[in-house]
Image (spheres, rainbow, N blue to C red):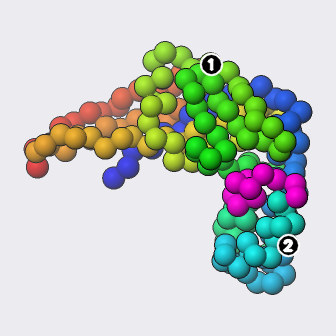
Amino acid sequence: MEVNITAKVRISQTPEVIRTIKWYTRCLQTCINVAWRKKIKNNFELHHLVYKRIRKHLPSQLAISCIKQACGIVKKAKSKPIIKRSSPRFNFPRNARLKGDILVLRLLKTRQEFKLNIPQCYKEYFKWKVKESLLRIDKKGRCFFLFTLILPPLKIVGFLVCVILTPLKELSRPNVCFVKSHTYPL
């Protein structure tokens, strides 16, 4: 069983971040339109139809992420989806990196660095493997980067260790604690 936590970290809202999210949303809608019209629910088929078109506007990893997300949306949809807001998915280490307290993102035209304000008590979680990450602007216009982190495998011979975490909300208002920690003999 995997233990995952999601860390929502506020980052500065730059014009390049806004442009990236807007272009990603447009390209996502384009992918959905093509997939819906041609009844495609497979990433591979959709990739061959739209990659060159959306690659003109997005870096390669974001274009691939957009195609994959579009297929996921179309598979679940009962009627043609209309996208108003989206959250670009970033792939560690291809188009996103974490260097200490610095988050480096590959946006439309540049790589941009963001200084993260991570409290000392949470730094240990950022040593965990990043499973998924999203760039999001909320309804109030604030910009966040969401990390889904995976607990590294525990190497204890003869015992099962169970750790339950409460989810992280915002790191500016810490809300994580170990609720239970049990060790069971195997």
> What's the amino acid at mark 1?
Asn
**Disc number placed over residue 159 in the picture, else none:** none
Q: Is residue 122 left or right of residue 53?
A: left
Residue in front for this viewpoint, 28 or 98: 98
Q: Amino acid at mark 2?
A: Asn
Return the x and y of residue 30 as percentages of the image width and height.
86, 66
Q: Residue 22 location, x and y as percent?
A: 87, 48
Q: Quadrant of residue 99?
A: top right
| Residue 73 percent location from the top left of the image | 71, 67
Residue at the (87%, 66%) spot, across then down:
53
Residue under pointer 2 = 33
Q: Residue at point 67% right, 64% down?
A: 68
Q: Decide whether residue 140 is among the magenta residues.
A: no
Classify 10 Å Cα crowding around label 2: few (below 14), some (14-19), many (20 and above). Answer: some
Q: Main secondary structure of the magenta part?
A: helix
Secondary structure state at the residue bearing disc 1: loop
**Vertical relation: 82 (above or below) 9:** below
Residue matched to label 1: 117
Which stretch did the figure color magenta? 56-65
Decide if residue 139 is in sight here: no
* Residue 56 quadrant: bottom right
In the image: residue 117, left or right of residue 5: right
Which one is in front, 94 or 178?
94
- Sequence order check, earlier mark of 1 and 2: 2
Q: Secondary structure at mark 2?
A: helix
Rounded to the nearest angstrom, the CA distance separating label 1 from label 2 is 39 Å
Residue 117 appears in the picture as rendered? yes
